[in-house]
Amino acid sequence: MREAKLHHILKETFGYQSFRFEQLNAINSILDGKDTLAIMPTGGGKSLCYQIPALYLDGITLVISPLISLMHDQVMNLKEYGVDALFLNSSLSYAESQKAKNKVLAGKVKLIYLSPEGVLSGHLDEFLSQVSVSLIAIDEAHCVSQWGHEFRKDYTRLGELKDKFPGVPVIALTATADEKTRTDISAQLRMKDPSIFVSSFDRPNIKYMILERKEEMVQLNEFIKANHPDDTGIVYCLSRDKVERTAAALKKLGHPAVPYHAGLSQEERSKNQHLFNTEERIIVVATIAFGMGIDRPDVRFVAHLDLPKSIESYYQETGRAGRDGKQSSAWMIYGLQDVVKLSQMLETTDADESYKKVARFKLDCMLALCEAAHCRRHYVLRYFGENRDGECGYCDSCIEPPVQWDATVDAQKIMSTIYRTEQMYGAGHIIDVIRGSKNQKVTDRGHQNLSVFGIGADKPKEHWNSVLRQLLNLGFIQIKNWEYRSLSLNKKSLQILQGGEKLNLRKQDFAPEKKSGKKSGHRASAKEANHGNDALFAALKNLRNKIAREKNLPSYIVFNDKSLHDMCQLMPASDDEFLMVHGVGHNKLENYGEEFMGLIGQFQE
Ligand code: ADP
Ligand code: ZN
């Protein structure tokens, strides 16, 4: 009975055929009155996990969202689906906010979007005491956790909602899955024995590629020209300055690129964000300020010109590609200077030491991904706690296995040094001993007298850092004490130390080098096959874009490309047929059915 009704809402309102991942389980858990934690990759469909219960339940759902732009987007989107939603935040004038409240009190609203400050400030207490709240949804819930990568102080107080709204179930949603963040979220939000639903993090339509930096702009230009000449994409850079330079360089090369960073005027940022939402083909070159609230489903590539500071960030940023499920690329170049730059940035912040420790560890994991000799996707999935064997077949390591070198002897040197120094020290000290540095820490402990002192003096520090990171990443050594990050040996180390097993690692080559002119050879795979009827598709796109312009909406909110492809294939000629199109519910049928079917009719023979 309940399930039929939920499917009905999914179909009639949102126009989707079936629930995805753990959506239905999460929804059922909420409707059973349980606190719920839903972990789903970006683009996985977290919003429906609370939007459908909001429509199912009597009363009102409060949605706590960290950014005003996110709220705007969600509300605009819901309105297009015919759902009564609004936001109450600091962007509204007094009169607007009064009007919104009256609408709520008249029983005309199902979802209210609020900021954490807004709901906790007390300003809304009197108003909220007059409405019947049946569910609280906390979006981007990783913001409560220091372990999350977007920690927000105001999020840590959200546990107080349990006092303000006793007995109301809470659903927390995030794309960050690691164990620590998860535990933190439920503790901070004072969730009672929450049901936890984790959906797979795999994004099988995204192809991962990570290259060493040689000539940045040449490499980027070649990548775009070979794989995405007509596509929309995002290029991430670390600094504002580099954003400006890169956007200008891309423009010069004939690509439609615009910059986006927090140093631009509000006006220019809105303008470029708007271009990103509405232009057929556009490349936004941005700092991570361009992030949350990007909903465009047909971003075909995300390129990183600088290393993100953690795998969480990398995964969230690359996750903005291919939300429509079509083949897309996540492309990155990196070099040693990234590590230096990021480490410096970290060390010069005034964050406390425990935060820095976590951050250093996360950066190391990110580097280990770059250096991984095996499947990139599986490395990332393992990081998020999903174990996979074998190869994915759709990342650079799988498609073109990297050149490897025999690292057995160097691994033995590291392990011996860890052993000789009694498994009490971290990477920095171990490498100092191997390279024969007579610094004070070494001499104070008499380590210059060990047999391993200086056995690796012939190779640079970076080399040893890289080998050590990979040993750690592959589980051949381990961190014994997290506080001091001291390293120790384990069973796997013995296989190598005792000479039984060989160890091959990815060959690193940081020396600048001219591009070898070799073709990538995968051109066809990154481009989607056209869905038959090109002329109809183009006409539908035109119509959609025209409507979007008239209504001043991003075009994908009217219909995304997947819906248009569906129309080309189904060629709907009646209301019932039109409802079968992906993303078409009653509201969209009513608003657009006639016009689109009229156009399709012209293409029917
Ligand atoms: P996120 O998890 O990043 O918040 P969204 O909730 O924005 O993701 O959903 C991403 C896209 O997937 C949206 O276009 C949404 O309408 C679509 N979507 C969500 N659930 C389904 C479903 N069950 N079937 C088809 N599309 C869905
Ligand atoms: Zn792979």
Image: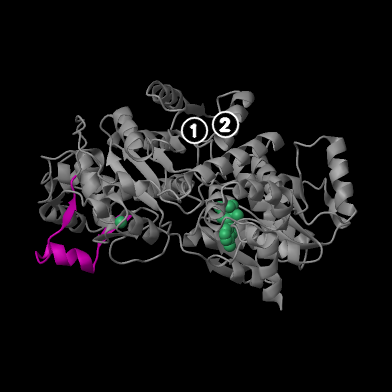
Q: Which residue is mark 1?
A: 282
Residue with the most extreme front position = 605
Residue 275 shows which numbered tag? 2
On screen, residue 499 versus residue 400, left or right, reads: left
Badge 2 amino acid = Leu
Whether 546 is among the magenta residues is: no
Residue at (36% x, 47% y) in the render: 526
Residue 190 shows up from this direction: no
Queried on whether the Cβ of the residue with tag 2 lies below 8 angstroms from ligand 1, the answer reads: no
Residue 26: % across, % down = 61, 68
Residue at (74% x, 66% y) in the render: 56
Question: Which class describes the residues within 10 Å of circle 1: few (<14), some (14-19), or many (20+)?
Answer: many
Residue 596: % across, % down = 64, 48
On screen, residue 75 versus residue 401, left or right, reads: right
Q: Is residue 290 above or below residue 503?
A: above
Whether 501 is among the magenta residues is: yes
Residue 253: % across, % down = 37, 24
Residue 579: % across, % down = 65, 60
Badge 1 amino acid = Ile
For the residues bearing labels 1 and 2, Cβ distance under 8 angstroms: yes
Residue with the most extreme bottom position = 1
Q: Quadrant of ligand 1?
A: bottom right
Q: Considering the numbered disc 2 on the image, is that residue within a helix, a strand or a loop? A: helix
Q: Is residue 331 above or below residue 59?
A: above
Residue 549 shows up from this direction: yes
Q: Which residues are magenta?
A: 486-507
**How far is disc 1 from disc 2 in space, using C-alphas?**
7 Å
